Amino acid sequence: MTTMTESDLYEMANLFPDSTGLPMVIWVSERGGARHDVRVKVCETHGTRMLPGNLATVAVRPAPHQISGNLSADDMRAVGAWIKLNEAVLVDYWEYRIDTIEMGRRLKRV
């Protein structure tokens, strides 16, 4: 289980199932002070509830792979497909090339 602080949530954009086509909420962020490459946070529970104490971390590159948490194989496949579809957008957001509104415009649903 990945633990997030309340301030961490303010630094991330949350994406609901209606926006992603996934069955759960996804959080994305810009690089900030991170020393790692692009990652997303994935709520392990389906639905629109944002549960900061119930998250998996999934790396975007070189290919989507789970770093922490407990996603089912089916959920990881779905998240991986969404990441592959949106990799360029996620990287541009991470690297501060686009803002949150542009990211939202460019993201595609699975």
Image: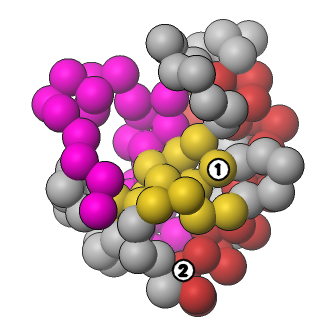
55 vs 49, nearest the viewer: 55
**Circles 1, 2 touching at the beta carbon (< 8 Å):** no
Circle 2 packing at 10 Å, graded few (<14), some (14-19), many (20+), is some
Which residue matches tag 1? 59
Q: Residue at x 55, y 58 (%)?
A: 67
Residue stretch rendered in magenta on the structure: 1-30
In the picture, the disc for residue 48 is none
Q: Is residue 54 left or right of residue 101?
A: left
Q: Is residue 109 left or right of residue 47?
A: right
Residue 45 location in percent, x, y?
A: 30, 74
- Distance, label 1 to label 2, CA atoms, is 14 Å
14 vs 42, nearest the viewer: 42
Residue 69 location in percent, x, y?
A: 40, 66
Residue 86 location in percent, x, y?
A: 76, 48
52 vs 22, nearest the viewer: 52
Circle 1 packing at 10 Å, graded few (<14), some (14-19), many (20+), is some
The image quadrant where one finds the C terminus is bottom right
Q: Is residue 90 left or right of residue 68?
A: right
Question: For residue 100, what is the image quadrant?
Answer: top right
91 vs 86, nearest the viewer: 91
Asked if residue 103 can be seen in this view, the reply is no
Asked if residue 32 can be seen in this view, the reply is yes
> Considering only vertical position in the picture, is 60 above or below 21?
above
